[in-house]
Amino acid sequence: MVLLVAVMAAALQTLTTLRHALWSVTEDAQVRETRRITRYTLAHELRTGLAGIDWVAGAGDSVALRAFRGTGVGCATVPQPLWAVRYTGLRRPDPAKDSVLVLAADGVWRVAKLVRARPGACGDGAAGEVWELNPVVPEAVVGRVFERGSYHVAAGAFRYRPGRGGRQPLTAQVLRTGAGVGSGVSGRGAGLDLRLAFGQAPVATTIDSARVWPRETWP
């Protein structure tokens, strides 16, 4: 009996050690994944816009932005209010949530609501899109499709909120968030400072700071 108790105690100790090791490996993987996702996502989103115009950091834990999803270049003449474009992007335009930032022949950018979008053809027969905008932009040259959204460092995770929807988590809940705990985002000039604090106890917290700069290039 004594020997059996000793063996069981050793087995339980080994199981506890293995469980702790597995938890540590899992947490480390989640931390690495959170760093990668937050850095890549913000850099990708901000590089297509201008600070103070296309995105604005606010409240120390969020950034609101025009999330650009594609670009259309005028390619054929069609009757107004329609506009035929050659389109490339991350996804197809969605009139339910998208607007278009339009560059006209006079060199001025204007924002218009995307009322309708359907497949069409360009003047050379290549595949394209036919859009209807409101208001109509005369002599439109280029249109950049975007949705309104915001990124948040809140409730323990990095989150995205499309339009007026809920804040959906993009990472595991491994961040220390809230006033005075370290995680957050803040605008500085043309860039953005990102601070990520990990761990549940103050002694376990590490700060990962990254500077994100826009490159002002189109998707």
Image (spheres, rainbow, N blue to C red):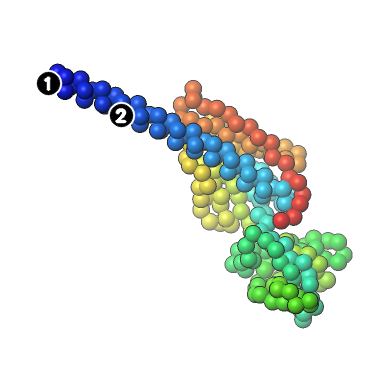
Residue situated in front as seen by the camera: 92 or 194:
92
Q: Which mark is residue 198?
A: none
Identified at 76% across, 46% down, the residue is: 215
Q: Quadrant of residue 143?
A: bottom right
Identified at 60% across, 63% down, the residue is: 97
Q: CA distance from mark 1 to mark 2?
A: 21 Å
Residue at mark 1? 1
Left or right side of 208 for 27: left
Q: Is residue 185 visible?
A: yes
Residue, far left: 1
Q: Quadrant of the C terminus?
A: bottom right
Q: Quadrant of residue 75?
A: bottom right
Residue situated in front as seen by the camera: 144 or 1:
1
Residue at mark 2? 15
The amino acid type found where label 2 is placed reads: Leu
**What element does badge 2 sit on?**
helix
Identified at 77% across, 79% down, the residue is: 78
Residue, far top: 2
Where residue 191 sits in the image (x, y, percent)? 72, 40
- For the image, the number of numbered tags is 2
Mark 1 or mark 2, earlier in chain: 1
Where residue 141 sits in the image (x, y, percent)? 81, 67
Q: Is residue 60 visible?
A: no
Left or right side of 176 for 76: right
Image height check: is 121 above or below 20?
A: below
Residue situated in front as seen by the camera: 54 or 20:
20
The amino acid type found where label 1 is placed reads: Met
